[in-house]
Amino acid sequence: MAKGRHWVALWLVAFLVTTWLVYARQTAAIRAARELADLRARRANLDGHRADLERRIRAAESRAVLVPRAQARLGLHLPSDSEIVLVPAPSGSR
Amino acid sequence: MARPAVRIQVVEFGVLVGLALLVGRAAQVQILHGRRWAEEAQAQRTERIVLQARRGALYDRHGTPLAVTQETYHVGIAPNELRDPAADGALISRRLGLTARTWQQALRRRYAYFAGPYSALEVQPLRSVRGVHLESVLNRFYPDPAVARATIGRLGDEGLGASGLERTLDSLLAGRSGAAVVLKDRAGREYESPARVIAPPVPGLDVVLTLDAELQEIAQRALDDALRRMDADGGDVVMLDPGTGEVLALASRQRDGSARPSAFTDTFEPGSLAKIFAAAALLSLRRVSPTDHVSGEGGKWSVLGRTITDEDPQPSLTLADAIRVSSNIAIAKFAARLTPAEQYATLRDFGFGAFTGIEFPAEATGRLRPPSEWTRTSAASLAMGYELSVTPIQVAMAYGALANDGLLLQPTLIREIRSAGGGVRYRHRPEPVRRVVSQDVAVALRNLLRGVVERGTGTEAALTNFPVAAKTGTARRVVNGRYAAGEYTASFAALFPADQPQLVLVVKIDNPHKGSYFAAQTAAPVTRSMLEQALAARTVALDRARLSTAAPRAAAAPADDDGGLVPYVVPWPYQPDSAGVGPRRAVPDVAGLGLREAVRTLHRRGFRVALRGWGVAEHTWPAAGDSAAAGSMVTLFADPHAADRVRSRGGAPPLRGPRR
């Protein structure tokens, strides 16, 4: 009789351990999935941020913005070709 | 009362029956209906989703992104799930740009959906708000939407390329969608699991275009300015690299501000731009020599019942003069030396009347009728650029053939195709279509075009330090099948620099209303402006090492090398292109001027210049004040120490002949 109780207890413990393992594994998986989703969101956020910055840099660098400002603030002008000096590359240089 | 043993047996039997029923039911659930229940459970916990493939990006030749794909979001709101509707509502309204009225309407619904799409930045603060459900979707994004819009094109509602290169390259850019199973929790939130990807999405290929973003901006701004200043109906600018056939910039604009790809699709009669192709046939077939002259007929010539006129009448013209002053009469007379078949074959060889083969979904062939459909005056008309319709890209490629020593290349907009990992799958190599003229003839034709800018109709495009070869074209416009009174197309095709050209530019202005309608005063200055900006730009695809040698080599010559004649602007050995005597003019006094300024002054007065010596201008032969025929050669003597001597003489010009 006592031997039968031991077996029952043993099966019960085995069942509980197995159930706990399944539960722990599922919990870890859900947590990992949440972290993955968060990381994806962060990456998307950073990508968006980078794209926004690139767009603003492009806009700021464009001739439509730069040329009028350079003329108004610094008194610069677009050079005519006679004001452009192209220095010949030294012979033998690559 | 039954005995205990019997009762126990009954209980045992009952338990046994119960267990048997349990096992039977379990077998029924697990074995008989197992598949159905498994599917139902799977459907509750998981969902199969399509993984969108990232569409490949488009870059300019320097790697500047022109079209990229980004993750954006649709936003769903479940009002009953909001913890603090007032505070959450304020945040959501602010981030999504909703009005108070729109938000109140959303609150009255069970589930409000805002398609957006919203950027990751906009929705970031909403991620932690309960009741907000984000649905990510990949979206096409154009960092600078105005750049080459007509060329790049756009996507349609289905996410497929609808126009422009987005359409042509759709199969390369689109990639292949994948599939995955996502896990769902009790609230219906989805979690991706890397282990549950059924088929990974294959991202599209990235395409590096031949366009140069900075040149493109220069072209667009120059065209916009010109159209506004001239109150024109529209226009196009094409820039390409003649050595590779790569298109560097394409700008098109109509009066209403729209930008359809008219450089590929709209045809026009090129007018005098086509004269150089008649000259190509004449030179290739040796039907004209440099000294052959035809009469200018006083600027008006009637032939076969048609009157041909010249804007700048000349008494007598060579082929070079005909190109330089754009004489209709002379080119029509010279073209009569060609058979219709020869004239047609040359124009056909230059690519007119046929697709260029560029990677664009729409392209017009223009019109070049075969000789069997010609009238008696067709040969003269074609020589003058009428009875022929072309697209700006065809003109650019044909002039590119002249720049490329006679070899016509296929134009391209694609420089490289790369995999998502960066590996190069395709790299453009120049694709010759055919040899149109020999190298010698191409050089001769470039010299003719050079004369146009130095002394002809294209002087408004002349640069001080860099020689330019070009041709003007002013043609009447055809509206509803008839020539419209007072409407013209002004066009200009240029090779820069004239020696070893690196850039072909074609500018077309449709129907300018303000000021002159002649290309010399409309399209030519636009070309010069673009060239100056290109020279000053940092990243523009010009080989400045080659350009620096194309610039006046005299600048690098040693000061003591004052012996021989130095080629300067005028090609050497000089071949006179006109035996006609021009009007006589006084030779200006250039003593004491810098060499460059002295040469420029003499050029402005219509003289050709041969240099002797180096340094500061000392005197000229014929001497200052003497009269000489316009177009004749003036020898300029220079000396490094001339400035002192000129000052000591009070600036009086020396009167002596050439040194021996």
Image (tube, coloured by chain):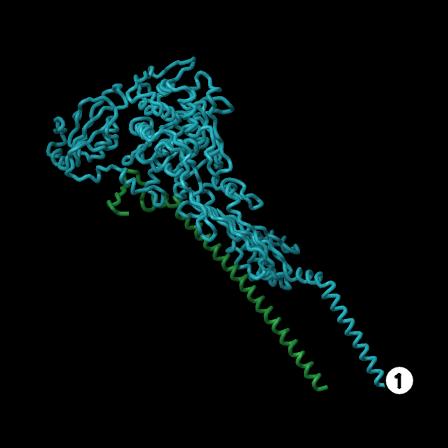
Chain colours: A green, B cyan
Point out residue B263 in the picture as x, y percentages from the top left corner: 45, 34
Residue furthest right in the image: B1
In the image, B458 versus B559, the foreground residue is: B559
Judge whether B154 appears above or below B190 on screen.
above
Point out residue B591 in the picture as x, y percentages from the top left corner: 16, 31
In the image, A78 versus B465, the foreground residue is: B465
Judge whether B618 appears above or below B131 on screen.
above
In the image, B214 versus A24, the foreground residue is: A24
Which amino acid type corresponds to the residue marked 1 in the rendered image?
Met
Identify which residue is drawn at 60% across, 58% down. B181
Q: Which residue is mark 1?
A: B1
Query: Can residue B97 be seen from the camera position used here?
Result: no
Judge whether B351 appears above or below B160 on screen.
above
| Number of numbered discs visible in the structure rendering | 1
Identify which residue is drawn at 17% across, 26% down. B621
Instruction: Decide: few, some or many residues near mark 1? Use Cα within 10 Å; few <14, some 14-19, many ≥20.
Output: few
Point out residue B503 in the picture as x, y percentages from the top left corner: 36, 37
Query: Can residue B648 be seen from the camera position used here?
Result: yes
Q: Quadrant of residue B580?
A: top left
Q: Quadrant of residue B469?
A: top left
Identify which residue is drawn at 56% across, 64% down. A34
